[in-house]
Amino acid sequence: MVPNLTTALAGPLLALEQRFLDQTTAIERWFRCAWQDHTPPFYASVDLRNAGYKLAPVDTNLFPGGFNNLNPAFYPLCIQAIQTAIEKYCPDARNMLLIPENHTRNQFYLKNVATLAGVLRQAGLTVRLGSVSPEITAPVTLELDDGQSLHLEPLQLNNGRWGVVGFDPCMVLLNNDLSAGVPDILQSPTGQTLIPPAHAGWHVRRKSQHFAAYDRVATDFAALVGIDSWRINPYFATCEDINFHERVGEDCLAARVDELLNRIRAKYREYDINADPYVVVKADAGTYGMGVMTVRDASEVIGLNRKQRNKMSVIKEGMEVSSVIIQEGVPTLETIRDAVAEPVVYMIDRFVVGGFYRVHEARGPEENLNAPGMHFEPLAFETGCNLPDYSANPDSPPNRFYAYGVIARLALMAASFELEAADPFRT
Amino acid sequence: MVPNLTTALAGPLLALEQRFLDQTTAIERWFRCAWQDHTPPFYASVDLRNAGYKLAPVDTNLFPGGFNNLNPAFYPLCIQAIQTAIEKYCPDARNMLLIPENHTRNQFYLKNVATLAGVLRQAGLTVRLGSVSPEITAPVTLELDDGQSLHLEPLQLNNGRWGVVGFDPCMVLLNNDLSAGVPDILQSPTGQTLIPPAHAGWHVRRKSQHFAAYDRVATDFAALVGIDSWRINPYFATCEDINFHERVGEDCLAARVDELLNRIRAKYREYDINADPYVVVKADAGTYGMGVMTVRDASEVIGLNRKQRNKMSVIKEGMEVSSVIIQEGVPTLETIRDAVAEPVVYMIDRFVVGGFYRVHEARGPEENLNAPGMHFEPLAFETGCNLPDYSANPDSPPNRFYAYGVIARLALMAASFELEAADPFRT
């Protein structure tokens, strides 16, 4: 990759950036006031797509991997943000248990765990790794190909509290998205703080609920800064009671796809956008880029062949797909040396702590850059997302990154609303 | 200067650094718990001296200048810390008024104001500068020699609220140390938040009160990490009712100097330190390095000549010195290419946000590096102070900087105790 490149500047985003730059005071105040009433998730990453005429989130991850892809220059920001967050959950904490995903053979993921554990330690916590994988029945040390190693121990209950041998944590941090449901051992509360809460897992979460919450956030925010909320918000619709194997729900899907394409076409006309609209059909509970399909015409979802149906039916941990979200396709116009680039923004508590570009040479601007088996090159953001430069061009790197950070924080706010609504103990 | 140098590593500090590194969890937890009960000042800078056998604060500034000397790579940390702090003072703030010092012809100071105003703006505030200088009776634009400019307006009362024309701030940030007392216009409360509070000004503050508070903090902290608190705490004594012009109080001063030198000698013997102890006599309310004298023997303070008496009598704003603090001299053993270097650490809210070395080629290791008319070269810290590296040598740059940050935060905690005790509205 190009180490001295700071941003994938090829795509235009001037109008939005200018608007944000003119209104940083109002924007930051709006976030500050909103966080008085709502609690941000402990951490999150947001995939953005920048179409030039539009900058929008397309996915929000509450169990972010990829911390190893951030610029190490941002670790101090991560550490400071973690320190702020801990005060909220467990101010007198010494110990934190980190529960990683079960796939322990993915070197990229293991490096993420090592980086995350590293900044948590630098923030002043003693961190150990507790696994919920049925394969981890005894402590094991995993060697990483960069020379680091990870010591993984089976999560266990000690006197009714989560821990590993000789270790009683105040906080348990999930970096496991619970796609297969909440493991038995995590089912009953122990008095320890589980972050994010279990109801943030993909066994409960639905993309459609997230984007419904994002609708509200984007509408409010667009009114504040005086823009059409469509500029920052992808249209979406849902279909429930889908069964791709049984060909149940095809008509509903086709109707919604058609409806959505028409709404997008109207917007394209309104803004003189000379492009073919498309939508992306995604498993509503899906993650890891599984169960995703790009569609340009309703007819494409009728009579899917066996391969397509299989692809759409099954998501992570072999879960069956029963409902989908149909989301307006936002092409990414950002490129780095002719390769398509998609920004991913990382947040801890209410702070943007860095990000990177997913750069993929073999993919087109309308394709999903986070797909199974797909190899992307991460390109870390070179500068911070909280450094608006009033004296520079609105399209200069710091202002571009600031715009990313604003939209990512809107998605973070939506996640906060979403978790509040899903909270089983909500009063 | 040496741009790629990261730390003035020449002085040894291994034992303390190792101790801190081994106990980061306990240390960070201790700070986190303490900040639950105490409010840190909005900002502060702390001058440290590293004698190898000892790392200690020698001065704590609650109206820090020198933000322009920080590494710009740290601005994101400043911005994030400011955002955290604002939530405490005025979460729905749009506007902040910054009150600078009155000396508007000092280019170094003006650059500090420009940098500070810059990061406050990036944190999402609309910032204007209100001057309390009698010379500023109309708006004036000051040109800086680096091409920036500052727009200064006279502070005024608008409907009983502090502001400048057409600007009603929620917060008023003092970067003026009030050495000459609180200006009339700031005397009566307006309902706006004045930070730091007026009782943090040098018209009220006494170094001896700060170091008395630091004694308590250092004693607690030393017990936590298992060290002799003298390792991080300079001995001190005070003399009141001093009048250098009239030669009143010389005997008291000589007695205290003698006493203090004997206490230091005993410690030097205990730790096999082969050096001549010395003390520094400073005006108790002094700042800007004025009214400071290095003394190696009690006899030196008896029969001062006219020049010496004049030097010790008057501090900033022409205030008369009436009491002094006698502080254990901590030689600085840190050097950069044979020049003596003293670390200065900057904090916003409870976070260390950067620092720099004062580097002075013409001064000795036992001299005051912050003196009137003195020119020092600032050398920004290259890495953060919150990045302890457990895999590196305890004396490696990140661990050295972490140690600075720990001691600086102890001084910050002392300042918090000091301000609580001085609060006229304290219940």
Image (tube, coloured by chain):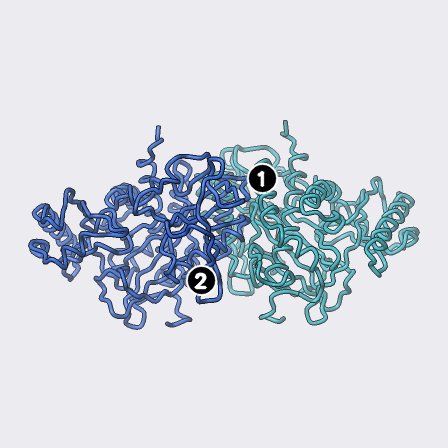
Chain colours: A cyan, B blue
Out of A159 and A290, give the one closest to the viewer: A290
Element under disc 2: loop
* Position in image of residue B391 (x %, y %): 42, 60
Q: Name the residue located 75 percent from the left edge and 48 percent from the top edge.
A: A228
Element under disc 1: helix
B338 sits left or right of A295 in the view: left
Q: Residues within 10 Å of mark 2 (few under 14, many from 20)?
A: some
A397 sits left or right of B381 in the view: right
* Position in image of residue A210 (x %, y %): 71, 43
In the rendered image, is residue B7 in sight?
Answer: yes
Q: Name the residue located 45 percent from the left edge and 60 percent from the top edge.
A: B142
Q: Find residue B71 and name its label.
A: 2
* Position in image of residue B397 (x %, y %): 38, 63
Residue at image mark 1: A33
Residue found farthest to the front: B137
B147 sits left or right of A393 in the view: left
* Position in image of residue A59 (x %, y %): 70, 50
> Which amino acid type is marked by label 1?
Cys
